Amino acid sequence: IDEIYKQKRMQISQEFLWDFVDSLCRDDINFLKTFLRNNNDPIVINGNSYFCGNRLFTSAYVKKQEGYDTNGHYVKYILTSDFYELLKFSAEKYGKIGHFEEV
């Protein structure tokens, strides 16, 4: 029963992930692919940047750290561990991160 429960839970999580990714704009999807390529190392944005829709970077699945250095204001972004692991699992097992988005 535990294994069936785990499989069902993973299916629900996977479906949720794919629905979320399908709702993102192209820039956000490209950032997700960057996180996959760099093993969730921080993405650093210097200065003020506009993100299309801001859906990914304002979601609960992204952590951010703001600061200042010799170049001025910056923001570092990483995905939460749980979200990154689900994204990585989807990419490795299915070769895609959304219903329509291949990696």
Image (cartoon, rainbow, N blue to C red):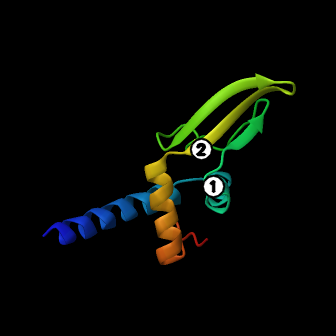
Tell me, for residue 35, which label it has, or none: 1
Compare residues 17 and 90 and report the one nearer the observer: 90
Q: Position of residue 79 (x, y in %)?
A: 55, 47
Position of 40 relative to 61 (above/below) = below
Tell whether 91 sits left or right of 4: right
Where does the image place residue 69, in percent across and percent down from the top left? Answer: 81, 25
Q: How many marks?
A: 2
Q: Nearer the viewer, residue 57 or 26?
A: 57
Residue 21 seen by the camera:
yes
Question: SS for tag 2?
Answer: strand
Ranked by sequence position, the earlier of labels 1 and 2 is 1
Tell me, for residue 78, which label it has, or none: 2
Kind of residue at disc 1: Phe
Pointers 1 and 2 in contact (C-beta within 8 Å): yes
Left or right of residue 87, residue 15 in this image: left
Instruction: Answer above or below: position of 17 versus 91.
Output: above
Farthest residue to the left: give it. 1
* Quadrant placement of the C terminus: bottom right
Graded by Cα atoms within 10 Å as few (under 14), some (14 to 19) or many (20 or more), the crowding at tag 2 reads many
Q: Does the rendering let one see residue 98?
A: no
Please tell me how crowded label 1 is: few (under 14), some (14-19), or many (20+) other residues with Cα within 10 Å. many
Q: Amino acid at mark 2?
A: Ile
In this view, 60 is above or below 7: above
Which of the image's four quarters has the N terminus? bottom left
